[in-house]
Image (spheres, rainbow, N blue to C red):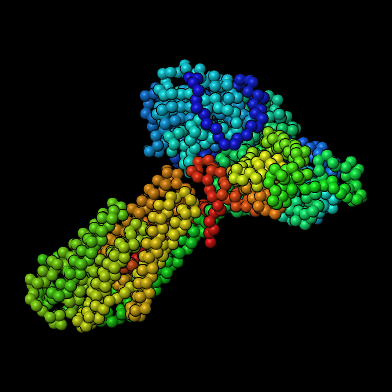
Amino acid sequence: MSQAIKLWDIHGGIHPEENKSQSNQLPISTLPLPKKLYLPLQQHIGSPSELTVKIGDKVLKGQRLAEANGFISASLHAPTSGTIVSIEERQIPHASGLTAETIEIETDGLEQWCEREVITDYLHTDPIALLAHIRNHGITGMGGAGFPTAVKLTPKDDDHIDTLIINGAECEPYITSDQLLMRERADQVIDGISVLGQILKPKRCIIGVEDNKLDAVKALRDSIDAHPKTLPFEVKVAAIPTKYPSGGEKQLIQILTGKEVPHGSIPADLGIVCQNVGTVAAISKAVLEGEPLISRITTVTGDAVSQKGNFETLIGTPIEDLLAHCGVDESKLFRLIMGGPMMGFTLHSTDLPVIKTTNCILAATEQEFPNPAQAQDCIRCGMCAEACPAELLPQQLYWFSRSKEFDKAKHFNLFDCIECGACSFVCPSHIPLVQHFRFAKGGIRQEEQAHIKSEHAKMRFEARQDRLAKEEAEKEARRKARADAAAKAKAEKEAKAKLAESQESPTTNTPTADASEGDDKKAAIAAAIARSKSKKPASNETTPSSVDIKPFKVASSQARAAHLQAQRALNAAKETGELSKEQIAEQEANVSSLKKAYEDAKAKLDQAKNGNTVAPAQEQAPSVDIKALKVASSQTRAAYLKAQRAFDTAKEAGELSAEQLTEQASEVSKLQTDYENAKAKLDAAKNGSPTQTAEAASSPTVDIKALKVASSQARAAYLKSQRAYDASKEDGSTSEDELSAQLKKVEALQSTYEKAKAALDDAKSGKTPASNPVAKEKASPSPSETFENKYKQVKVETSQARAAAKQAQKAVDEANEQGKDETQIKELETALAESVQTYEKLNSKKLVLQEKVKARKAVEASAVSQPKESKPAPETVAEQPPAEDDPTKKLKELKVAASQSKAAWRKLERELGKAQEAGEDTAELEQKVSAAKTTYEQANEAKTTAMAALNS
Amino acid sequence: MSLLAITSPHMNKSNARGVGFIMTQVVLATVPGILAMTWFFGWGTIINICFALLVALACEALVLKLRKRPIGFYLKDGSAIVTALLLALAIPPLAPWWLTLVGVAFAIIVAKHMYGGMGYNPFNPAMVAYALLLVSFPVDMTQWVLPDTAPSFSGTFQHIFGLAPAFDGMTSATPLDAFKHSANQTLNELFQSTPALKSETLHAWQFVSMAYLLGGIYLLTRRIYTWHAPVGMLGSLSVMALIFSLYDADVYASVSFHLLTGATMLGAFFIVTDPVTTATSTKGRLIFGIGVGVLIYIIRAFGNYPDAVAFAVLLMNFAAPFIDQYSQPRTYGHKQARKGLPKKKD
Ligand code: SF4
Ligand code: SF4
């Protein structure tokens, strides 16, 4: 096992004084059990662990205290048995002095173990189970930043791991914990490698050890020779030249394989996984002994302590205790460093615990690490560039960082700086270069954050503006409708009596006009009759002579057209494959319902034909004509609204191409025209002059509002894609082809937008100040039917929105897994939040409508059963059933609904409060809260009105 | 116990190898050259150097005071000393005192501090001053004493400070100068007829050049700078000289003549290696050196000035920022080196 291994050189590097002999003379010794242990929930990279214990709990050694919270997280275990005496926010050892929730354990000295799970036959264990074991045992990287090991060992599907690199370089001066580990516990390291071999199935494994630790090299080689059976792959120990920072992951990979980890990639992309020796030993302990990561070897050195050496230290041991044990001379202690002198960070107090990544505590005197000399001007000597292992030009980066020319600093690859400190080390002008680079990196991140934020704010603002405009329009429409209803109420009362007489079937005198729907009672009643008749064709009592075929024909052909259009749209969507399965299913349902409508209409037409020969429209009994027209109108309207909603959803989801969108838009406007025609005919029929109005209505109507919305959405889509394109261009990591593809997309969107705008402008210029389209949209024939239709629509929309939300969630998850850059993930997350919000809104709407439909049905049922008893209540405004067959029950239901929605609203409000306290971004929550509030208010209103009606 | 909060790294080699150390090494490396100059051209060199140092320190202190900078802190970096030293080595040993005064003052006050001081000056101060003197006082700047004819220490002193009449007939042009103004003679005739080109004279120049080379090698071994700029300059100068002398050996001087006369070696190891005003990456420095070498040859062979180091260096100083943009190293993990500056965004 000692044949020469080909080594490569890294650029730069330095040779600081090693200072290792102070601490590597004595064997590893164990620290006396501390009285208290402090275990922060955040000792690793990723999200903090989640507590599984509480204050006062007795815990056993090795018992889990907190579990991994999310994929990139690690669990935490009790280093010894004892009692949890507090869980509170404390300072943790961190470069920027962060705090984290910390579990305080009072040790009981019994060292009572919990039950341990051991996998002795790991060579025949499923790698997944081994990974789970490693994850459950809280193993994190012990050499560097503390990245959860299981995550690093879970390669992406397409990465085959070819080389396993074990990092025993320990290039930092002063630190000797890995050296001692390799020297004394080489078997543990080799066992760990064997476990990793079972997980990763590599072809070979190289252990890189600097050649100033030949004792460790020898120990490892001996151990390899003693383990031939458990190592089904080649394992070699490479003694690499001592040079800082050869122990950097990227540098070690370069030294051992000659490969560079490409910018923006991880070693796994090269088929390489790199693990620290300490981590590997911890894995072996976890698998073979069932011991979670509860202790580690820590070097204590520096001239301020008298007893330098390496100690097996429990995680959570106060550094105070450690230093005291080593005989610290506090008067001499000048700089306390966790980690090595090159990359470690200073601690502000000794009142901090040892954590999983604490490989060294360096208690230095002033002579050892005096205050840094005052920095002089950079003389551009280039020594920093010569020392830089990343082949950067620190002198240029320094220049740009100082002048805050961040774009230039980025261009000079600032983010490839590994902050190794080699440049600062050699700079003859004593310039703390790394500090400047950290500052610049922070500055750039902040700028990017701010940029993203402002983009979000902009998007939110636009969305809000849209929403407010819509709400305003709706309010206006409602107000107008109410006024209309009130004005008509009187006339209707009179008309009603007459109408009732002219009806052959019993008058289903629905007592309330749904004023908010803006329709008149006459039509409502007529439609209700028509509907009940169409449901029961056998009992259809309409006199054949009074039936006109024409309206049925119209209705039938319109319904057919609607159906065919929807079918076409569906086919197109299927072909392009841009819709998700769920969406297609929704659309299919849509199409089939349209088909049914068409078939109904056709059946009616046939019926009418059978019962009647040609009869001119003018001779029709107006009430029957109205009925038929009503049906046609309501059907076309339903078709139109459905298409409109589907179109909006598709647009929002941004999954349709520009052409598809325009196609759908034209379809929508056709359907709208159909509907308006039908309605006009209906109105005309009511007025008694059908032919005229039919003609009048046949003149094309353009919905400016729809066009406006379409235009603004197209614009938003265009701008968004433009931004995305700019971002990726700037980022520079996107390939040329991708960029040009993006550019094309941007241009396509731009032209869509321009088209939409042109259409809008056309429409505007040709606009006649006719009717309020919103009011028209809201017009509806029968309250119950409207509700039902509406409910159905909303239901469809809701499920569409849910599908969209699911998709967005999937996208976010994927992006997270693939380690896409933060900006992208942020964007996706925003999209997700938006779609979730849409879904929630729709869902609450759906529920409200469901309620209403129920209520309305009950009302109608009662109206049918007690036709004469019901009395009109024109002054009641909206959305409530004033009289029912079982009003008490209804009221109860409403009460429940109200209290539920109230609870939901309150909950959201509490969440909002919390989020605000935490200083999080609350805009989305605020919107949710207001949505929930609206729901509640609606429910409450319904409740009170119902109550009032009942009382009266 | 008061704990100090400093970010990493906590160790710094520069406590031993600071800017002052670098400058000291440079000064040390000039010693062989100074000795050789004094040996052949008399005490003038040393007197000039001492005077130049005094002027430089005085100017530096004055300007720092005016700029309200800590005088002691900045004087310690030794950059003014090096500037003065190099200028004093470049001008003729018997140059009058006011020449030195004007040159050094201009170098420190204008070429260095008016551009922002240490580290910010785009042009090599010593070369700026040299060029200024050459253009303004061409006669004084080209009168060199012939080797081994220099007056005694006191005589030289009196001469420099104008206390005694000039030594007529003892001064002469440098070999390069003589070569330059050799109109219609072939090389052979020229070398025989001109005192400045006699073998003893050439010998003296060669000796001085070798002394500078020695100092340069010392600095290279001490890793004060990398080989790129000197090798680039000497290499390109040699190649140019070789090509032209092969083309017509009667008109164009040999490679060794170009390398070992004039300020070639001084330039290669003490001027183009000035970190502040050259390109900053090693690749850039190689390019910088090559550019200087080519320009030196062109100016020497086809231009009007006998020696060309100062002009060539200044011209390349202009180009240094540009070279910097196009000579970035390829960063770890990147396929290609970046070029240019980031595109402007609006
Ligand atoms: S080592 Fe220091 S002085 Fe030299 S170029 Fe780098 S930053 Fe400037
Ligand atoms: S800290 Fe950054 S710039 Fe400095 S040497 Fe290390 S990688 Fe290069």
For image coordinates 59% across by 36% down, the residue present is A12
The mark tally for this picture is 0
**Where does the image place residue A807, in percent across and percent down from the top left?**
36, 51
* A303 left or right, relative to A387: right
For this rendering, which residue is in front, A211 or A925? A211
At a point 42% along the width and 54% down the height, the residue shown is A739
**For residue B141, above or below residue A289:** below
Name the spot of residue A849 as percent of width and height, x first: 32, 62
Can residue B4 be seen from the camera position used here?
Answer: no
Picture quarter containing residue A662?
Answer: bottom left
Residue in view at x 81 percent, y 41 percent: B147
Name the image quarter holding residue B203.
top right
Height in image: A482 above or below A189? below
Q: Which quadrant would residue B67 be assigned to in this image?
A: bottom right
State the residue in front, A83 or A722. A722
Left-right relation of A517 to B197? left
Where A815 sits versus A526, above or below? Answer: above
The answer to whether A799 is drawn above or below residue A12 in the figure is below
In-image side of A584 versus A621 (left or right): right
Residue A120 placed where, x, y %?
Answer: 41, 22
Q: Residue at x 10, y 69 (%)?
A: A607
Quadrant (top left/top right/bottom left/bottom right) for the N terminus of chain B: top right
Residue A140 coordinates in the image, percent (x, y): 50, 33
Q: Is residue B11 left or right of residue A900?
A: right
State whether residue A548 appears in this view: yes
* Nearer-the-camera pick, A716 or B123: B123
